[in-house]
Image: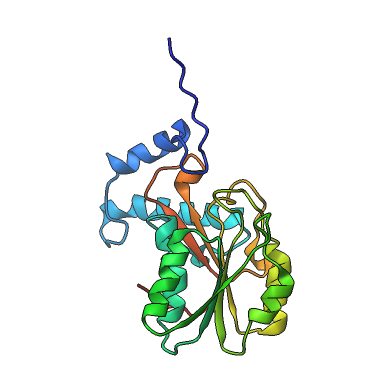
């Protein structure tokens, strides 16, 4: 008998049986549209709010700061493009080792005339905070840094980066792609200086096609 060994949980994970069983009632019996006003929608609406509240509690946030998406790629794109959509063509910074969901979104901004700089990392894949200070400008509107790299596992000094950003330009919005970190490292965005945070369910034994974007209260971002 051949045994199959899977060693790529950074790419995706097997759906947990408890998660699967928790989903079933809402896929079969209680399939109502949670946004509708009639009685059949009440249970799904209540379950949706309970899920949002539970997730918010896990990261020390408020329920209305949690916005469900179709996964990490949508969350990343909303963070990058949603800030840019506010109008003025400001300056954006991302690291050179971001996921393509971020890099491709940044290249899209460049296509429309936005200025984007790509922050280098050292041989361990870690951002130099000294370099970051030099990159931040008066019109830097967004900086995006992943918390854990999906290929080499480098862990970025997020809290230190946040302090540098806010000290250099308090108006700059700090986005963190936490898709490889969520559920594995302690994450409290408010305590870490994070304004936007992307996650994805299928990295932590949840289903594919679900994630969320944490948007700190008061952060101005356009819908897409």
User: In the displayed structure, does residue 218 sit left or right of residue 70?
Assistant: right
Residue at 70%, 83% in the rendered image: 168
Is residue 136 visible in the rendered structure shown here?
A: yes
- Quarter-of-image position of residue 145: bottom right
User: In the displayed structure, does residue 121 sit left or right of residue 73?
Assistant: right
Vertical arrangement, residue 107 with respect to residue 60, above or below: below
Residue at 46%, 66% in the rendered image: 103
Is residue 29 visible in the rendered structure shown here?
A: no
Residue at 44%, 80% in the rendered image: 84
User: In the displayed structure, does residue 175 sit left or right of residue 224?
Assistant: right
- Quarter-of-image position of residue 24: top left
Q: Closer to the camera, 115 or 197?
A: 115
* Quadrant that contains the N terminus: top left
Q: Closer to the camera, 163 or 28?
A: 163
Residue 182 picture location, percent across and down: 58, 51
* Quadrant that contains the C terminus: bottom left
User: In the displayed structure, does residue 171 sit left or right of residue 86?
Assistant: right
């Amino acid at each position: 008998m051949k045994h199959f060994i899977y060693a790529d949980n950074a790419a995706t994970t097997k759906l947990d049986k408890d998660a699967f069983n928790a989903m079933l009632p809402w896929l079969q019996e209680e399939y109502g549209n949670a946004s509708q006003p009639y009685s059949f929608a009440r249970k799904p609406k209540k379950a949706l709010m309970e899920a949002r509240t539970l997730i918010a509690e896990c990261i020390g946030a408020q329920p209305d700061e949690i916005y469900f998406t179709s996964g990490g790629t949508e969350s990343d794109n909303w963070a990058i493009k949603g800030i840019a959509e506010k109008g003025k063509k400001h300056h954006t910074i991302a690291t050179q080792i971001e996921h393509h969901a971020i890099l491709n979104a940044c290249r899209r901004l460049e296509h429309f005339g936005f200025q984007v700089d790509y922050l280098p990392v050292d041989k361990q894949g870690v951002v130099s905070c000294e370099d970051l200070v030099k990159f931040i400008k008066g019109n830097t509107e967004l900086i995006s840094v992943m918390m854990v790299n999906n290929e080499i596992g480098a862990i970025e000094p997020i809290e230190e980066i946040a302090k540098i950003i806010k000290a250099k330009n308090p108006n700059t919005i700090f986005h963190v792609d936490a898709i490889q970190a969520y559920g594995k490292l302690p994450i409290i965005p408010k305590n870490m200086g994070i304004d936007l945070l992307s996650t994805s369910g299928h990295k932590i034994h949840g289903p594919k096609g679900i994630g969320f974007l944490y948007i700190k209260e008061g952060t101005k971002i356009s819908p897409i």
